[in-house]
Image (spheres, rainbow, N blue to C red):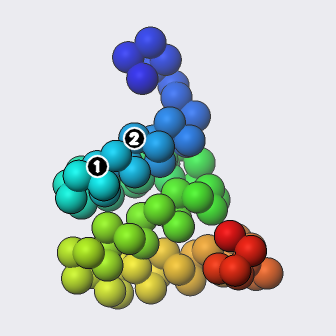
């Protein structure tokens, strides 16, 4: 990301997955929020932010993110994902 000052959204959600795996949920959420600033309708970013929200007990935020997933793709299913 140092070499690309305008990284695509996938850079962020890949980076955030590392934070989530390390249990650094606040950092993960912050990175995913940057991803959504770059690409506001990025399905993967919304799906990725649900997990750290839930781990932190932020169920309302997780529900809002899940609702946004369904707005972006009304045919979304966990089974297909």
Residue 21 occupies quadrant: bottom left
Above or below 37: residue 79 = below
Q: Residue at x 31, y 56 (%)?
A: 20
Above or below 42: residue 54 = below
Helix, strand or loop at mark 2: helix
**Neighbourhood count class around disc 2 (C-alpha, 10 Å): few under 14, some 14–19, many 20 upward:** some
Residue 59 numbered tag:
none
Q: Where does residue 2 sit, x and y in percent of width and height? A: 38, 17
Find the residue positioned furthest to the right: 75
Q: Is residue 5 visible?
A: yes
Q: Residue at x 23, y 52 (%)?
A: 22
**Neighbourhood count class around disc 1 (C-alpha, 10 Å): few under 14, some 14–19, many 20 upward:** some
Tell me, yes or no, whether the two marked residues, 1 and 2, touch with CB atoms within 8 Å. Answer: yes
| Residue position marked by numbered label 1 in the rendering | 19
Q: Quadrant of the N terminus?
A: top left
Q: Where does residue 44 sit, x and y in percent of width and height? A: 58, 58
What's the distance in space between the residues labelled 1 and 2, CA to CA? 7 Å
Helix, strand or loop at mark 1: helix
Q: Is residue 31 visible?
A: no
Q: Is residue 21 left or right of residue 23?
A: right
Q: Residue at x 32, y 67 (%)?
A: 52
Total number of numbered discs in the rendering: 2
| Residue position marked by numbered label 2 in the rendering | 15
Above or below 79: residue 13 = above
Q: Where does residue 40 sit, x and y in percent of width and height? A: 58, 55
Q: Quadrant of the C terminus?
A: bottom right
């Amino acid at each position: 990301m140092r070499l690309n000052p305008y990284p695509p959204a996938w850079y962020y959600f890949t980076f955030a997955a590392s934070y989530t795996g390390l249990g650094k949920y606040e950092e993960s959420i912050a990175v995913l929020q940057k991803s959504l600033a770059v690409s506001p309708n990025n399905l993967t970013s919304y799906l990725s932010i649900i997990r750290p929200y839930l781990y932190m007990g932020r169920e309302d935020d997780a529900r809002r993110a899940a609702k946004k997933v369904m707005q972006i793709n009304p045919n979304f299913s966990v089974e297909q994902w």
